[in-house]
Image (cartoon, rainbow, N blue to C red):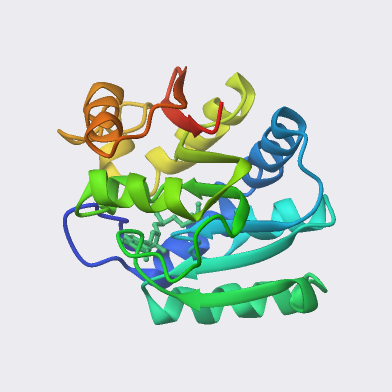
Amino acid sequence: MGEVRADGPMDVEGFLAIAREVFAPLYPYYADQFLRESGLRRGVCLDIGCGGGDLGLAVAGRSAMRAVLLDHAPAMLKAAARCARERGLARRALVLAGDACALPLADASADLIVSRGSVMFWKDLPRAFAEVRRALAPHGRAYLGGGLGTPQMREAICRQMASRDPRWASGSPPPPRPGTDPGAHEKALRAAGVTDYRIEREDTGHWIVIGV
Ligand SMILES: C[S@@+](CC[C@H](N)C(=O)[O-])C[C@H]1O[C@@H](n2cnc3c(N)ncnc32)[C@H](O)[C@@H]1O
């Protein structure tokens, strides 16, 4: 089992196994939360840095939304396409190669934008946040960031990760890398000219909500 590293090449198979075996409860949990909070039920949901596609597909599976699953790693897109087929969602899912900093989407074309566990890899945050604002429909909502769900989910995930990855050995997630904390994200949002946002802090992470 390889580590998912923010400062080096990602072990795709290792990450996909962790997503399936450890993080799995988070996807339906956050999909439900984002749909409930946003009130959106149809249109396009863009999942940036989709990995195996779990979050975007959880949104599509719980609504009438179509999922655009975007990642810059071909192996992740292959896994996302497979996952869409396995869940019977292939007709409502599109996999798309692209970078968060230059989204291959028209202005105002996404109703809901989600991204979990990917922002910390984006090389130019002001550019990426400006791209999210540009691609988001006027009535749309974006959720970018990460968290470990309920206290029960957090406890189970930390326990399982401690036996797989030394960075979780203390029983907590690794500390955020410099430049990925809420303060740095607020600075990048302001530099991007995004004003309609709020930051939702959780015990183990935070979500940037745009379109509020
Ligand atoms: C830790 S994985 C999270 C995957 C998925 N969102 C999940 O929650 O299971 C991070 C993902 O972000 C993707 N990624 C990183 N930087 C990216 C960028 N600049 N543009 C698009 N995708 C990116 C990686 O290829 C990887 O699939």
Across the whole image, how many numbered discs are drawn on residues?
0
Question: Is 26 placed above or below 64 here?
Answer: above
Q: Quadrant where the N terminus lies?
A: bottom left
Residue 43 relative to residue 207: left or right: right
Q: Kindly indicate the quadrant of the structure image that contains residue 75.
A: bottom left
Residue beneath the point at 66% across and 43% down: 25
Question: Is 148 placed above or below 23 here?
Answer: above
Residue beneath the point at 45% across and 26% down: 197
Q: Estimate the x, y position of residue 65 in percent, counting from the top left.
A: 77, 57
Given residues 181 and 131, the one toward you in this image is: 131
Residue beneath the point at 36% across and 34% down: 194
Q: Quadrant where the C terminus lies?
A: top right
Given residues 81 and 212, the one toward you in this image is: 212
Question: Is 5 placed above or below 76 here?
Answer: above
Q: Estimate the x, y position of residue 107 in percent, counting from the top left.
A: 50, 59
Using the rendered image of the protein, determine whether residue 175 is visible from the camera's viewpoint.
no
Question: Is 80 placed above or below 202 here?
Answer: below
Residue beneath the point at 67% across and 64% down: 67
